[in-house]
Image (cartoon, rainbow, N blue to C red):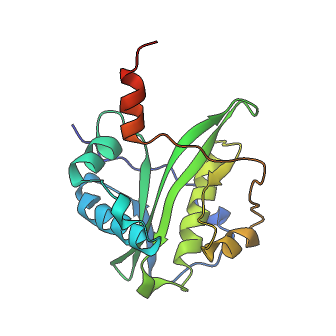
Amino acid sequence: MYTKRKLNIVPEKYNCMKSVKGLLIRSAYVEDVPLLLQLIKGIAEYEHLSHLVSATEDSLKRFLFGDKPFAEALIAEFDNVPAGFVVFFHNFSTFLGKPGLYIEDIYVLPQFRHKGIGGSLFMKCIQIAKDRDCGRIEWSVLHWNPARKFYEKFGAQPIQDWIIYRLDEEMIEQISLKKN
């Protein structure tokens, strides 16, 4: 039921960042689900949002590695030790008529920060977007997050005219039960 998927990542020659000695970025596999959940809890704690985490190993297995995966994940290992991850998925721009890549989470454990790991994960996403002919990459960043300056070094700009809206699972359920 769960499949091992490997990403078709652009060769290293397209990487414009310096190589980080001891760093391996690899596709996540179903066997990595406990690690992924641990890293998700890590980013939630960093963002002061731990109370919002309801992901489980079963839900990650189902939605990342099931019959219809909804997202992909990469694991960063530094000297063979898990150091961070990125989860992304494709969206579609009707204006561009092309797919886009949306970065849901990118996170490096505190003890591995400032070693180029986050930048390397970000560059892998750029490489994947290029390889898959994506028209853009998008992500959300909390207003207080110092990573904003990092992203702006790449030329990324906040989109001032757009507001993110969200319906949570409870609201989806309530609205779907309403009759017209």
Report if residue 54 is visible in the image.
Answer: yes
Is 108 left, or right, of 33 in this rendering? right
Residue drawn at point x = 30 percent, y = 54 percent: 54
Residue drawn at point x = 37 percent, y = 72 percent: 42
Report if residue 76 is visible in the image.
Answer: no
Observer-nearest of 85 and 163: 163
Residue drawn at point x = 62 percent, y = 49 percent: 129
Is 171 left, or right, of 155 in this rendering? left
Residue 114: horizontal and vertical position, in percent? 55, 86
Residue 170: horizontal and vertical position, in percent? 36, 39
Residue drawn at point x = 66 percent, y = 41 percent: 133
| 111 over 150 or under it: above or below | below
Residue 81: horizontal and vertical position, in percent? 33, 79
Q: How many marks?
A: 0
Observer-nearest of 141 and 136: 141
Name which quarter of the figure residue 78 lies in: bottom left
